[in-house]
C-alpha cells in the first residue's frame, strides 16, 4: 500500500470511527471534533477553546464533507456513545443546507452560514481589522484608512462581477452531479488581480475545455443561479477558496504598496511586517476572521 493510499484509508469513516472509540475509552469527557480537512482546525480551534471551553478537545480530519456526515451517522447508530460530546463541522458549499435535508440528529452538526470558512476571512469588517492592527492605521486619525477600505470594497465588487459566471457555472455542474477537480486551480487561472483593476480571462468555452467531463449548461440555468447568488450576497455564497485567493492576492499587493517610499494609496511609507501566503493565511489571520453568532451559540452549547 502506498503512503497516499494509507493516508486515505485512515480518513475513511470506519477508520475514523475506530480512532474515536479508542480515544473515547481514554478521554470520555473530551469534546470530539470532526472536520472536513486540514485547515478547519486552524479556524475553529481557538474558537472551540474560547466558547466551548472543553476539558480536552480531540480533533479528527475526515477528508471531506461526505466523510464527516458518514462518521456522524456511524457514531449516532451506536447508542453507547450517546453521552459523548461530539461536534461535526462542515461547509455549506453550493449544496442545500444540511438543516433542510438532514431530518434527524443534526443538532451536533455545525454548517457554515456561508460557502465555507474561507468566506469568513474576506468581509469588509475583517479587512478593517487587519488594516487597523497590521498596518497600524486607525480610522479616527488617518484618511488613509478610509481610502484603502473603500479601495478594497470596490475591487471586491469588481472581482465578484468578474467571477459571477464562473461560480454560477460551477454551481450548476454541482447540481447536475458533476465533480470538477478545482483544487489545482487558483483564482489567477481565471482572473488577473491588481490594486487598479480586476480582469477576467475565461469564457464558458474555455471552462468546458478545461473540464472536459463537465456538462453543457443552459443560459437559463446560469441566469437562475446568478439570481440566487444576488439575493444571498456574493461574498458569502461564492466559492470560498476563490474568495480567499482574491483576498490574499489583494492584501499582499497592498502590503507591497504600503512598504514603498512613494504610493498613491498611502500618504507615508509604512513598515508592514505581515507575511501571508496561500498556505498560511487561514492560520495567520484566524484572529481577524468573523465569528458568526450561530457558531458561538453552537460552541457554547458544549460548555
Image: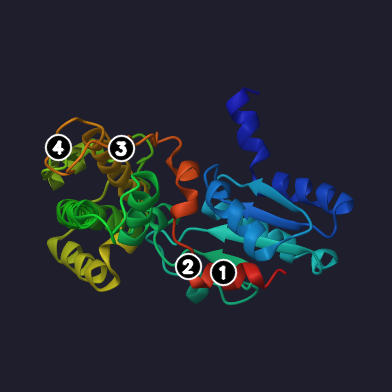
292, 233: nearer the viewer: 292
Nearest to the eye among marks 2 and 4: give it.
4
Which of marks 4 and 2 precedes in the sequence?
Answer: 4
Q: Residue furthest front?
A: 141
State the residue at coordinates (21%, 35%): 257
Which of marks 3 and 2 precedes in the sequence?
Answer: 3
Judging from the image, the colouring scheme is rainbow
State the residue at coordinates (21%, 31%): 260
C-alpha span from label 1 to label 2: 7 Å
Which of marks 4 and 3 precedes in the sequence?
Answer: 3
Residue ID for mark 1: 296
Residue ID for mark 2: 292
Q: Is residue 199 above or below residue 291?
A: above
Q: Residue furthest top?
A: 2
Marker disc for residue 263: 4
> Residue 253 location, x and y as percent?
24, 37
Q: Quick one: label 2, few (<14), some, or many (20+) residues within 10 Å?
A: few
Marker disc for residue 44: none
C-alpha span from label 3 to label 4: 28 Å
Q: Quick one: label 4, few (<14), some, or many (20+) residues within 10 Å?
A: few
Q: Is residue 71 above or below residue 186?
A: below
C-alpha span from label 2 to label 3: 26 Å
Q: Quick one: label 3, few (<14), some, or many (20+) residues within 10 Å?
A: some
Residue ID for mark 3: 186
Which of marks 1 and 3 precedes in the sequence?
Answer: 3
C-alpha span from label 4 to label 1: 40 Å
Amino acid at each position: 500500500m502506498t503512503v497516499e493510499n494509507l493516508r486515505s484509508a485512515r480518513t475513511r469513516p470506519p477508520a475514523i470511527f475506530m480512532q474515536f472509540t479508542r480515544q473515547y475509552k481514554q478521554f470520555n469527557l473530551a469534546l470530539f471534533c470532526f472536520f472536513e480537512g486540514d485547515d478547519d482546525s486552524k479556524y475553529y480551534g481557538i474558537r472551540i477553546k474560547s466558547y466551548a471551553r472543553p476539558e480536552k478537545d480531540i480533533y479528527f480530519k475526515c477528508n471531506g464533507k461526505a466523510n464527516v456526515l458518514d462518521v456522524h451517522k456511524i457514531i449516532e447508530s451506536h447508542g453507547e456513545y450517546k453521552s459523548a460530546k461530539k461536534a461535526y463541522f462542515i461547509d455549506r458549499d453550493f449544496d442545500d443546507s444540511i438543516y433542510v435535508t438532514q431530518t434527524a440528529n443534526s443538532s451536533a452538526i455545525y454548517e457554515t452560514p456561508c460557502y465555507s470558512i474561507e468566506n469568513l476571512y474576506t468581509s469588509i469588517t475583517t479587512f478593517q481589522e487587519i488594516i487597523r492592527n497590521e498596518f497600524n492605521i486607525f480610522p479616527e486619525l488617518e484618511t488613509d484608512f478610509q481610502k484603502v477600505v473603500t479601495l478594497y470594497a470596490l475591487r471586491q465588487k469588481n472581482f465578484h462581477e468578474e467571477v459571477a459566471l464562473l461560480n454560477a457555472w460551477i454551481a450548476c455542474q454541482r447540481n447536475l452531479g458533476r465533480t470538477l477537480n478545482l483544487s489545482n486551480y487558483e483564482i489567477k487561472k481565471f482572473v488577473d488581480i491588481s490594486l487598479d483593476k480586476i480582469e477576467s480571462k475565461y469564457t464558458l468555452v474555455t471552462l468546458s475545455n478545461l473540464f472536459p467531463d463537465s456538462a453543457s449548461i443552459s443560459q437559463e440555468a446560469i441566469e437562475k443561479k446568478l439570481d440566487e447568488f444576488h439575493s444571498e450576497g456574493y461574498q458569502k455564497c461564492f466559492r470560498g477558496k476563490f474568495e480567499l485567493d482574491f483576498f490574499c492576492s489583494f492584501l499582499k499587493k497592498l502590503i507591497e504598496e504600503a512598504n514603498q517610499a512613494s504610493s498613491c494609496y498611502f500618504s507615508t511609507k509604512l513598515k508592514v511586517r505581515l507575511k501571508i501566503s496561500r498556505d498560511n493565511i487561514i492560520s495567520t489571520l484566524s484572529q481577524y476572521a468573523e465569528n458568526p453568532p450561530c457558531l458561538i451559540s453552537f460552541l457554547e452549547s458544549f460548555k
